[in-house]
Image (cartoon, grey):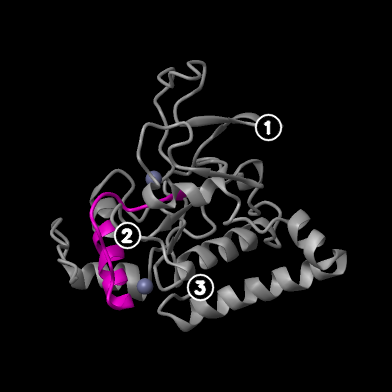
Amino acid sequence: MAYNYSVDHGVSYAVALEAVIARLSVTRNLTGGEWTPWKGGVFIHYVGSGQINPSSCSDCQYEIAEIWTKHYLGEFGDLAYNFVVCQHGNIYKGQGFQRGEANGGYGAGLDPADPTLKAQHIRVPTYGQVGRNAAFYSILGLVRGGDAPSSALRASIKDLIRYLRTYDDPNLRAGNLLYPHQHGDKTDCPGPLLPYTKDGSLERTRARVIARHGPDAVRLPSRATAYRILEDLERGAVPLE
Ligand SMILES: [Zn+2]
Ligand SMILES: [Zn+2]
């Protein structure tokens, strides 16, 4: 089924294409806020209700462009997600390794389960209250409620999480927590990706890899995966700075 393009938020598709697809976001810390992803980990998101059902990856790029226009005209002025992973398994970089602003959360004192939380915070092991955007990467699975997440999409999210968890710079390395957006927030997000955030299928932890391949197999495969992702990113229209 053809997707009905509607980049109609006051920014032309050409502008969005230039900004998102050709250059993607100019990565910067959109709010200047604290950025300590090693305290937390990763939140998983989806696009919303409806269906994308892309016939090719240019459909995915239209979808990303549309999301970008909303964010461009919104609070943060740029794509709020760190990474976008599509049904073809391609990984697009939004804010990348800079702090993003997509992880939502209740206002101060409004979380019914934990009224002592500060605005857009979450309680994690070891560090206590941390900001949802300060301590967590955001990965957007480019699916809507009516789409079934493909195995390519799930495999790339899994590789990306592994990559973030083993990133060379410890200040940018993701902690081992993996949550659906709706953990600590009132939202249906991440829709059809929800079960995969709970069954361990998006996680290839160090412990799991050691259990399967032995301790010597850990570092090289993880780096090989990282390089493959980087190559994929660079092969696509996704320049890494
Ligand atoms: Zn979300
Ligand atoms: Zn795609």
In reply to whether residue 103 is colored magenta, the answer given is no
User: In this rendering, which labeled residue sits more in front, label 3 or label 1?
Assistant: 1
Query: Which region of the structure is painted magenta?
Result: 44-67
Q: In the image, residue 11 lies at what x, y percent?
A: 17, 61
Verify CB contact (< 8 Å) between mark 3 and mark 2: no
**Element carrying mark 3:** loop
Q: Is mark 1 within 8 Å of ligand 1?
A: no
Q: Residue at x 81, y 70 (%)?
A: 217
In reply to whether residue 49 is colored magenta, the answer given is yes
**Residue 201: in sight, yes or no?**
yes
Task: Looking at this view, name the residue that lies furthest to the bottom.
Answer: 235
Residue located beneath label 2 in the image: 147
**Element carrying mark 1:** loop
- The image quadrant of residue 16 is bottom left
**Element carrying mark 2:** loop
- Amino acid carrying label 2: it is Asp
